[in-house]
Amino acid sequence: MPKCLQLLILVLTLIPFRMGALPAGAYVAVDIPSRYTSSLNGLAEYIAEHYDGVEAQLWALYSWEASRLRYNLSKRDVQLTITNPDELATWTLKSGEGVCANFASLFYSVATRLGVESYLVGGYSVTHNNVRDDGHEWVGCIIDGKPYFFDPTWGGGYMLNEAQYVHSLNAAYFMVEPAKMVRTHMPEDPLFQFLDYPHFYDEIDNPGATHPVPVYFNWRDSLANYNAQDTLARLGGQLARMRANGFANDWIAGEILRLQHNYEAQLLNRQVDIFNDSVERCNNLINYINNGYAKGGSAKEALREISDIRMQLTNMADALNDADFSSDVLVQGAANLQGQSETVLNTLQKLEKSLKK
């Protein structure tokens, strides 16, 4: 994610904090010995051992990283080379700095190790009714069946004149309910608003204006489906939800284009994998036939294999035909794959004829 800046800070009265369950209003920074903070597992194990209850454990994590990590805008490109959340979180632990993606990935990775159902949420922020067009990242968690949000980046301080980061721990972005969080944190994917009636982008961007009537959305069932999907299906679902979520501002429009390209590239890569598998099976089949069939084999079995490979290649071709690739490179790649597939199908047809004689 690009840089993420906090323009508003809430100052809270700090009350002494004791180990164990989190007392109401006890929001002070937790100190964790450095020997436990060199790895994600070590950090999670220390928190689990010394704090009772999910809220107390998550506050320990939130307050520790919000008060110890240094916001450093010069590290924003690290997330472009380290895309795995655990790897980015580990890098963040070692460096002690980063941007919103670093803060969020660390919270997500440790919370997951604490047994909390957690999700990295990407989107944009809105402060004083002004849309930030630089992107932001935070974390959503399901706790005892209820959704909450955490933003350790904004919880750790704020930018002074967009030049200097000022450390100032606050609990304003700890365990926030969805209806409140969406006022300042708008997910790019409406699913991660965790609301039965999710807001259209324009509702948050332009409060007070006339907007379409909200539509009921069963986010719990959709989240269950999301969890069961592979990366490609998740991308497809996200794109569909984003396109249906009303007027898209410039940032969302750019994200849709980026996600569409990623979706198309992953789709083509999947079809390449299917094609390569088909070629390998076809070569094995030819060897099988040339060697007079394997022990116990028969021409009938070879014909069944031909039929199965043909169906696999046909399904691949149908998927490519249905895809509306927007990149010339991807269009050409799909065309090349279709041409190679025809060659394999012709080979299968010849094999089939020879086996039926």
Image (tube, grey):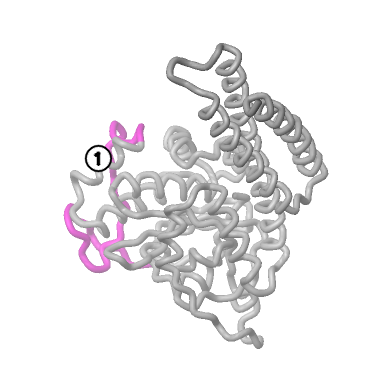
In front: 121, or 72?
Answer: 121
Where is residue 40, by image quadrant?
A: top left
| Depicted 158 relative to depicted 280: above or below | below
Image quarter of the C terminus = top right
Judging depth in this view, the residue of 38 and 340 nearest the camera is 340
Residue at 71 percent of width and 53 percent of height: 322
Pick the front one: 62 or 302: 302
Side of 287 where 197 appears, left or right: left
**Magenta region, residue range:** 12-39
Secondary structure at numbered mark 1: helix
Q: Judge from the rendering whether residue 247 lies leftward or rightward of residue 70; answer left or right.
A: right
Q: Which residue extends farthest front?
A: 357
Badge 1 is on which residue?
45
User: Residue at left 28%, top 47%?
Assistant: 114
**Where does the image place residue 107, in percent across and percent down from the top left?**
40, 49
Identify the amino acid type marked 1.
Answer: Glu
Q: Is residue 7 above or below residue 277?
A: below
Asked if residue 107 lies left or right of residue 329, the reply is left
Residue 195 at x, y percent in the picture: 45, 73
Question: Is residue 320 in view?
Answer: yes
Give the residue drawn at x 60%, y 75%.
200
Say above or below: 265 vs 39. Answer: below
